[in-house]
Image: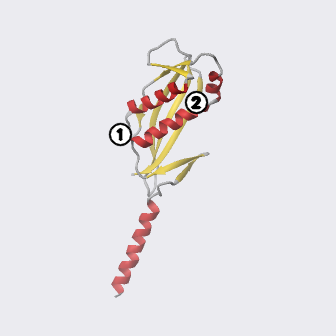
Amino acid sequence: MRSAIEFLRLAAVAALAIAITAPPASAQRTRGDSEIPVVRNIGMPEYIDMANEVSDQLLASQRIQAIAQRSEAAKIVLGIPNNNSARWDVQVQDIFDTVRNRLVSEGRMRVFSTGATDVEFILTSEFTSTRTAGRRNENVLTYTLTLTTIEGEFIGAYSSHRAFVQ
């Protein structure tokens, strides 16, 4: 009888430990001033969401809003995203297509391939990841779009983050 009670206590402690370490599906984590969604699994649907989020941020920026007031669309070079993350499953061509299609569909920009010279802006993008120390081994994946002029003047950087546990 005594060993059965001890077994139940150990099982309860183990269940509590698992519940504490696994994030809920809609959890949030704070990074600086912003909230980072915590997801259980990360894959192409989340990468596409991140690409749409940074595209929205870019299109809502003051500089792009000012460009939208002009009679002609801005000419921009969009590079293929660099995957400098620990995630091998980021399909950079799909992310590129998502961002390009989003920018073109807004009608404010004409998107050119790398190597075009008669453009106003360059838009680069990158996936990076960091691993936090601790019992949860949490990873944070970041997707960043950086907008510069053709002369190299920094205009802005727009990013989206996802935290996940491996």
Q: Which residue corresponds to mark 1?
A: 89
Q: Residues within 10 Å of mark 2 (few under 14, many from 20)?
A: some
- Looking at this view, is 70 or 119 the one in front? 70
Coloured how?
secondary structure
Q: Which mark is residue 143?
A: none
User: How many discs appear?
Assistant: 2
Residue 97 locus on image (x, y percent) = 42, 29
Q: Which residue corresponds to mark 2?
A: 59
Task: Report the Cα–Cα distance between label 1 and label 2.
Answer: 27 Å
- Which circle's residue, 1 or 2, is located before the other in the chain? 2
Task: Check disc 1 and report its element: helix, strand or loop.
Answer: loop
Q: Is residue 58 left or right of residue 132?
A: right
Which residue reaches farthest bottom?
1
Residue at 47% across / 30% down in the picture? 99
User: What amino acid is found at the position of numbered circle 2 in the picture?
Assistant: Leu
Residue 109 locus on image (x, y percent) = 54, 21
- Looking at this view, is 58 or 68 the one in front? 68
Q: Quadrant of residue 43?
A: top left
Q: Quadrant of residue 87?
A: top left
Which residue reaches farthest top?
118
Image: 13 above or below 160: below
Residue 126 locus on image (x, y percent) = 46, 32
Residue at 51% across / 27% down in the picture? 105
